Amino acid sequence: MITAPQIRAARAFLNWSQDELAKQAGVSAPTIKRVELKGPDSSSLGTIKAIKAALEAGGVSFSDEGCVCPSATPCKKTA
């Protein structure tokens, strides 16, 4: 699952405000604020999946190592 820092980094990469991410994910802006502050455990799994899907649709991908990468550049583990 994605982390709060990954969500913030992906949102920054896309130059999206919290309001824009909320709109794209179909959730409220206070939900985005809470998840970014308190982490994914502060919301339902469905909400976190919607946030991740919106960010991926916007053009980022996530790695298990915690990286956030442009979708055109697959995330790779560095040495």
Image (cartoon, rainbow, N blue to C red):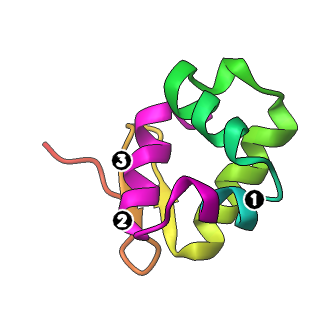
What residue is pinned by disc 2?
A: 13
Q: Which amino acid type corresponds to the residue marked 1 in the rendered image? A: Ala
Specify which label sits upstream in the sequence, 3 or 2. 2
- Give the farthest residue toward the bottom: 72
Would you say residue 54 sits in the magenta stretch?
no
Residue 51: image x %, image y %? 69, 51
Task: Give the quarter of the figure containing the N terminus.
Answer: top right
The circle on residue 25 is: 1
The residues colored magenta run: 1-20
Specify which label sits upstream in the sequence, 3 or 1. 1
Rounded to the nearest angstrom, the CA distance separating label 1 from label 2 is 16 Å
Residue 64: image x %, image y %? 47, 39
Q: Residues within 10 Å of mark 2 (few under 14, many from 20)?
A: some
* Residue lying at 61% horizontally and 31% vertically, measured from the top left: 35
The circle on residue 67 is: 3
Mark 3 or 1: the one toward you? 1
Q: Secondary structure at mark 2?
A: helix
Mark 3 or 2: the one toward you? 2
Would you say residue 12 sits in the magenta stretch?
yes
Q: Residues within 10 Å of mark 3 (few under 14, many from 20)?
A: some
Q: Are marks 1 and 2 in contact (CB under 8 Å)?
A: no
Residue 18: image x %, image y %? 56, 53
Q: Which amino acid type corresponds to the residue marked 3 in the rendered image? A: Cys
Residue 10: image x %, image y %? 44, 56
Q: Secondary structure at mark 1?
A: helix
Q: Secondary structure at mark 3?
A: loop
* Residue lying at 28% horizontally and 48% vertically, measured from the top left: 77
